Amino acid sequence: MIGAIETAFAKLNLALHVRSRGDDGYHALETLFAFCADGDRLTLEAEPGLRVEGPFAAALGDGGDNLVSRAAQAWRERFGGEVAGFRLEKNLPIASGIGGGSADAAAALRLLAARDRIDPADGAVHAIAAGLGADVPACVLSRAARGEGRGEQLVPVSLGQLAGRPVLLVNPGVALSTGAVFRAWDQIDRGPLPHGVDAALNGRNDLQPPAIAIVPIIGDVLDFLGMQPGLILSRMSGSGATCFAMFEDEAARDAAAGGLPACWWRLATTLLP
């Protein structure tokens, strides 16, 4: 298993409804998770520790206190086994609403599950994932799912006609604190998330307005994406600042990517089923 590689698939919230804030400070969510065909890449290595490379490696420093390392430690505490080492190719911007750290942790759990011949759907694996972060269980699954609670209560769904669609991810180069965005939410419950694929087409992201209030350039990204030919859907993902646009075909997606300002990060990819 040494040398095995897992993609930490970029996560999208096709819709995200914030229903309430509990006395414990956590928010009750309803969301539709989807995943892209590309993301970070994690390799299982013989030497313990975490080595980080790639375009966004510098943002993680030495990688010492990283969700990958925490996932490996939690795995060893629960299942034992050899100390794990990893090499992380960091291709996704951090603090960007597309699950970077959560997806990396999930990829580590999938690698360790394969190494130790444990089903990644095992309840103990889910418990480890949920303990690492609300998005990590969905990222372990890495397929379309409806998430409730803090996002960790998952029901797989079909994306229907949206599966495999070309999608463009765009980030204006601004890291955005999840906590700050949730604190800026106006605490108004605007209603439940529809079920099925209608959740994407008829849903919303309740964190989009507060994120734009904090980082106005997100609105510029969405304005640009909303004017592109061949567009099916555009929205901010998670707590931002990354936005996505889904297109009718690759030509429309690539044309939109070509019109972006050079300083904005972009990823042309497709939605997984």
Image (spheres, helix red, strand yellow):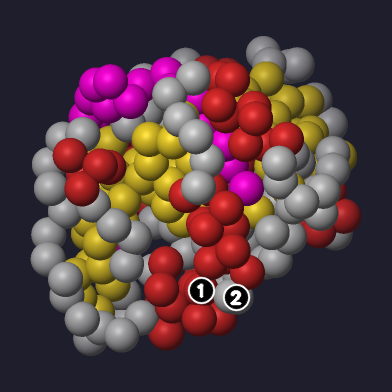
Q: Nearer the viewer, residue 147 or 4?
A: 147
**Quarter where residue 42 is shown:** top right
User: Quarter holding the C terminus?
Assistant: top left
Q: Amino acid at mark 1?
A: Ile
Q: Is residue 46 visible?
A: yes
From the image, tell me which residue sits under label 1. Answer: 212
Label 1 secondary element: helix
**Disc 2 to disc 1: CB gap under 8 Å:** yes
Report whether 239 appears left or right of 101.
left
| Mark 2–mark 1 distance (CA, rounded to whole Å) | 5 Å
Amino acid type of the residue that numbered disc 2 sits on in the rendered structure = Val
Horizontal relation, residue 52 to residue 158: left or right: right
Magenta stretch: residue 163 in it? yes
The residue that appears at 81% across and 54% down in the rendered structure is 263
Pick the residue in front: 49 or 192.
Answer: 192
Confirm whether the magenta stretch covers residue 51: no
Pointer 2 local density, CA inside 10 Å: few below 14, some 14–19, many at least 20: some
Image coordinates of residue 152 in percent, x first then y, are 30, 50
Percent x, y of residue 32: 29, 44
- Point out which mark residue 190 bears: none
Q: In the image, which disc is placed on residue 215? A: 2
Question: Image check: 129 left or right of 105?
Answer: left
Q: Which segment did they paint magenta?
A: 150-170
Q: Name the side, left or right, on which 260 lies relative to 249.
A: right
Q: Position of residue 38 (x, y in %)?
A: 61, 28
Whether residue 71 is visible = no
